[in-house]
Image: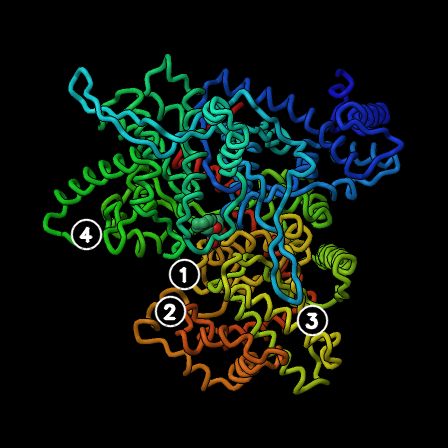
Amino acid sequence: MKEFHDADAASTNPKNIGELKTALVNRLIYSIGKDPIDTHERDWFFALAHVVRDQITLRWMESMRQYYLSDAKRVYYLSMEFLIGRTLDNALLNTGGYEAFRLALEDMGMNLDEIGGEEEEAALGNGGLGRLAACFLDSLASLRMPGFGYGIRYDYGIFSQRIEDGWQVEHPDNWLRYGNPWEFARPEVLYRVQFYGRLVETQDTDGQRRYQWLDTQDVMAMAYDLPIPGYGEGTVNNLRLWAAKATRDFELRYFNEGNYIKAVEQKTSSENLSKVLYPDDTTQMGRELRLKQEYFFVSASLQDILVHFGTEHRDLAELPDEVAIQLNDTHPAIAIAELMRILLDQHGLAWDQAFGITVRIFAYTNHTLLPEALETWPVRLFERLLPRHLQIIYDINQKFLDEVGRRFPGDGDLIRRVSLIDEDGGKRVRMSHLAIVGSHKVNGVAKLHSELMQSTIFRDFARLFPDRFINITNGVTPRRWLHQANPGLAGLITEALGDSAWVSDLERLRGLVPLAGDAEFRSRFRTAKFDNKARLAGLLKQRLGLALDPASLFDVQIKRIHEYKRQLLNLLHVVTRYNRIKDQPTAAWIPRTVILGGKAAPGYRMAKLVIKLANDIARVMDRDPALQGRLKLVFVPDYNVSRAMELIPAVDLSEQISTAGTEASGTSNMKMTMNGALTIGTLDGANIEIAEQVGRDNLFIFGLTAGELAELRRRGYQPWDYYHANSELRRALDMIASGYFSPEEPDRFKPLVDSLLMGGDQWAVLADYADYVAAQEAVDRLYGDGEAWARQAVLNVAGSGWFSSDRSIREYAGSIWNIQPQA
Ligand code: 26V
């Protein structure tokens, strides 16, 4: 095996290149089982991935050894989602091997980019929350921090989206079809997870009540490890994903009855647990399988964490000095009850000591204020599935409410509001309340979000636990989102700043500020942007047969389709612009390409209708000669991490137009800023901090603030008033409602227009329309002066350093986890 490890990843001298080539051929033959004269590109991808993995693996073992020896405190990041995307390029760039492997493949007549295109994405997430988890893993490793991810190894990630006749159609994402070359299966790391069953109460010798959980239906959790390579001198950390496996209990039972088929059926049904990622991040669906997934990965992770801690020979009182656990939203919040159960029922700790330990270990990140996305579970379901956990939740609640009652005597309504159990209608467990009461820190993900969290949904808790609530603004990894996705701009920045230290110290981008005034630099900056746009145009031509003009302004909104994100507002502007061009075809229009992309939850009717509307408008405009060279609308199908990496470097105008107070943070806003786009946005989420960092004059802020909107609603918001007052708005809405874009089915889009005019316009689209259109006019004026635009675009890059996930992770490490970078 020697030859695989000898080669130095980074060196491009001929001897090393020769060794890499040998390693590749050996892997192709011995690991993939293919004859080099008869191969598919995919075979070479797998051979390459194995060679790269070998190199990472050695560093990974070193890192693990070092963490073990230093016995440093660790953080475990529990998340139902890790939206990683592809690994090959990122691994090559983080370990410095990119150029050497590129040359080795070139020598063999192959192209690294094409080989890399064979990789399936690990799309184990819905959107922002899952991608944030992936950025955080990159930063933890790059900062040499002992941070480990735990999640689920779904057989099927987020569905892939096809557009058929303008409609979204979902297809299963069978990403493991050809195997996953990055993972290590650990069939020996196997834990039993219990469900259902019954409780038996016993008395300890000291008279304490204890519970046994018996006659359960069990599933095994098997570990798969994914190495996470940090950048440069970073460590290689571990992401452990759990797959469901049947226990042997069924086998034995049914085989004894001679019922072989029944045994195999049962096996399939327990293994379904990790089959598929739930694709709806907008409504809480309350499905039993989802709650099972949550408990499944939490139970396995806690067992694993305690094995590592060495429960057998150590005092559990020390656990909080060794372990921090971050809950990525409430999805893993059942971990609080599970740790209590372990401490009480398996280790015999007294309640107060167990709860003290638990609270010191856990912290909770909230990612949304939208009530329909907040997790609650029917008490009846909990009682059946996790009877002991429900009991513990009731006990936590009892003690908590007693305390509240002592501090605020006579405030029965407060008790009702903060209870872990919602007593209205069918009783439900409020997972966010459990997460808050069981954690020592609760954070929001941008300043405004953290403020609103404390003044609205968690207001009572902020009063009860004033020190518990903090803000940690999100960030994104500059390795993937600038260095890797945008080599043109990255190279220019490195040249301008004199070295590439900015890749791991993003605040250095401030050094670009003076260059905004340098005509020579601006010209090269503009060329880099133009090249990215031309490259994107080439890809879309090849894939979709589209003809995009790279000289036009690329106006891009890419994110999940949701009413609060207001893709509909974007489309109303497109229709307005269409009408203006039709009215004055010979005026000097700034050519624009409006690009939309994103998936709708499969059951979200309005969101799916928005996708159809975009495609119908695009079709009408494409057929209209008056629009050619002036305005084009494109819906890019199947928006995912790889697509984001192609699109973001090519963006001129970043659309961040959510209703103020609804987008917790946003992270594509940060990625686009980092890549030299200007933002058109509301004062929402992290947009506010982007404005602070890059300067309010260097983006286009429009619309009502969260405060103004609250005030408008108090007075009584009347969407019709806006309809009557604005003739362009009226015209656009009437066209959509009457079938101008859907003559074959004139009523098709009535539900969308009705939600605005008849349904109260929950997201204040009409209230912000006029200001949005005015802001778009300001965009045209600035874009008309290419130099002035470029100056501001440079200032956006220069001000984006704050949005590195390295900064976020340092804040978590310092103010929540109390962990340190390792030497
Ligand atoms: C909720 C649910 C509900 C149950 C079914 C599955 C599921 C999956 C995810 C979610 C939570 C969605 C919350 C979310 O993704 N929030 C986004 O988090 C980003 C990272 O903090 C932030 O930038 C976005 O603004 C925020 O919308």
| Relative image position of residue 287 (x, y in whole percent) | 42, 48
Amino acid type of the residue that numbered disc 2 sits on in the rendered structure: Leu
| Nearest the eye: 126 or 815 | 126
Q: Looking at the rendered structure, which numbered label has been put on residue 709?
A: 2
Q: Which residue is mark 1?
A: 661
Q: Secondary structure at mark 3?
A: strand
Color scheme of the displayed model? rainbow
User: Which class describes the residues within 10 Å of circle 4: few (<14), some (14-19), or many (20+)?
Assistant: some
Amino acid type of the residue that numbered disc 1 sits on in the rendered structure: Gly
Do residues under tags 2 and 1 come within 8 Å of each other at their CB atoms? yes
Q: Earlier in the sequence, mark 1 or mark 3?
A: 3
Residue name at image x 76 percent, y 36 percent: 45
State the residue lying farthest toward the front. 258
State the residue lying farthest toward the left. 410
| Relative image position of residue 158 (x, y in whole percent) | 57, 48
Q: CA distance from mark 2 to mark 3?
A: 32 Å
Residue name at image x 78 percent, y 40 percent: 115
